[in-house]
Image (tube, rainbow, N blue to C red):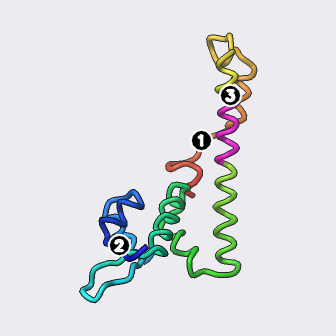
Amino acid sequence: MTGLRIGEAAAIVGVDTHVLRHWEDVSVLVPARSGTGQRIYDENAINRALVIRRCQRAGLSLAQIRALGPEEGESRRALVEDHRSRIAEVVQQLQATDRFLGHLLSCSHSVISECPECSGFAAAAGPLPGPGGVLSR
């Protein structure tokens, strides 16, 4: 792939051009520049942009994503392990919710509090996370 201009790169990544400009402003993705100053997105920049997008969808902030690049050693490991732990929590919550919804398909109780399984699910859920959910800590 030869270098692409910002509009072409944005289309491949699935974002608006202003998003790529913002990523550059916060130094999470800095594309090469042509002799005339235009941004040029090579294969490496496109791949990095796709990784950034996927990481954002998984709940990482741009600051966290930026820290994953140059960081080494324990700092990077701690960031990755912390986020993996949060993802595991969300996966467990989703699996429990899926089991609950599966139970609801056959539950004969009209009120959740009358059903031991439904009540158990509510009790096991515990308090709700703060604003932004589990991944926003």
Disc assigned to residue 4: 2
Q: Nearer the viewer, residue 29 or 136?
A: 29
**Residue at the image position 59 percent from the left and 41 percent from the top:** 128
User: Which of the pair 31/90 is nearer the observer?
Assistant: 31
Q: Position of residue 77 (x, y in %)?
A: 69, 73
> Are there few (<14), some (14-19), or many (20+) residues within 10 Å of tag 1?
few
Dot 2 or dot 1, earlier in sequence:
2
Element type at mark 3: helix
First in sequence: mark 3 vs mark 1: 3
Residue 73: x percent and y percent?
A: 69, 81
2 or 3: tag closer to the N-terminus: 2
Q: Nearer the viewer, mark 2 or mark 1?
A: 2
Taking the spot 39% from the left edge, 79% from the top edge, the residue there is 31
Res 72 → quadrant: bottom right
Q: Where is residue 110 drawn, in percent x and y?
A: 62, 11
CA–CA distance in space, label 2 to label 1: 45 Å
Separation (CA) of disc 3 from disc 1: 17 Å
Disc 2 versus disc 3: distance between alpha carbons?
A: 48 Å
Tell me the residue that label 3 is attached to.
100
For the point 66% across and 77% down, the residue is 75
The residue positioned 70% from the left and 36% from the top of the image is 96
- Residue 128 got which mark? 1
The residue range painted magenta reads 90-100
Q: Does the segment drawn in magenta span residue 130?
A: no
* Magenta part, dominant SS: helix
